[in-house]
Amino acid sequence: MNNDEVIIHGECMVFKSSIPQKAKKMKTAAQPYVIVAPSETTGNHHVVDLKPGVAFYEYEDVLYMENEVETTIRCVVADRHDEITLSPGVYEFGSQQEYDPFTARLQKVRD
């Protein structure tokens, strides 16, 4: 993956990135995964599996991950989207936007 490539996993977007100096490390002990894109309607969250060597950070409502080992992004309901392996690196997570012509504004894609 090049720095300008984007991984699309449903409405979740994953970018190669760097962690801002002011980012705070998240406490993830005893969690099997981190929700990187919540599902507002169906509960089928996009998640990244936690394991030793995978750490998450937050800064200004943006989620970052540094992984020293391969990990996966997947959905809670397995048949919704394919699993994607994320190679070691630093990633930033975002959500796709859509234009709502009735409200004349951009909004986060919801599932």
Image (cartoon, helix red, strand yellow):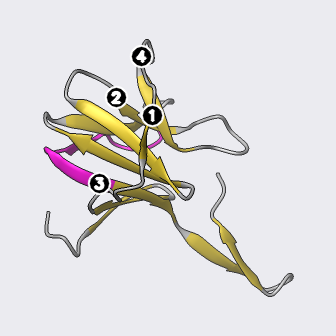
Amino acid type at circle 3 is Tyr
Instruction: Tell me if label 3 and label 2 are in contact, CB under 8 Å.
Output: no
Residue 87 on the magenta span: yes
- Please identify the quarter of the rendering in which residue 31 is found: top left
Query: Quick one: label 4, few (<14), some, or many (20+) residues within 10 Å?
Result: few
Spatial CA span between label 4 and label 2: 12 Å
Q: Position of residue 37 (x, y in %)?
A: 53, 47
Task: Give the label on residue 12, or none.
Answer: none
Q: On residue 29, which mark appears?
A: 4
Residue under circle 2? Answer: 49
Residue 64 x, y percent position in the rendering: 38, 50
First in sequence: mark 1 or mark 2?
1
Which portion, as a residue range, is magenta?
79-91
Q: Which residue is at the far right?
A: 102
Give the alpha-carbon distance from disc 3 to disc 1, as whole Å.
15 Å
Q: Earlier in the sequence, mark 3 or mark 1?
A: 1
In front: label 4 or label 3 = 4
Report helix, strand or loop for mark 1: loop
Mark 3 and mark 2: span between their CA atoms?
A: 14 Å
What residue is rendered at 34% in x and 28% in y? 49
Which element type, helix, strand or loop, lies under badge 4? loop
Residue, disc 3: 91
Residue denoted by label 1: 26
User: Is the Cβ of the residue at disc 1 closer than 8 Å to that at disc 2?
Assistant: no
Q: Amino acid at mark 2?
A: Asp
Element at badge 3? Answer: strand
Residue 15 vs 54, above or below: the answer is below
Image spot of residue 3 (x, y percent): 18, 70
Is residue 65 positioned above or below 18 on the image?
Answer: above
Of labels 3 and 1, the one closer to you? 1
Report the side of 60 relative to 66 (left or right).
right
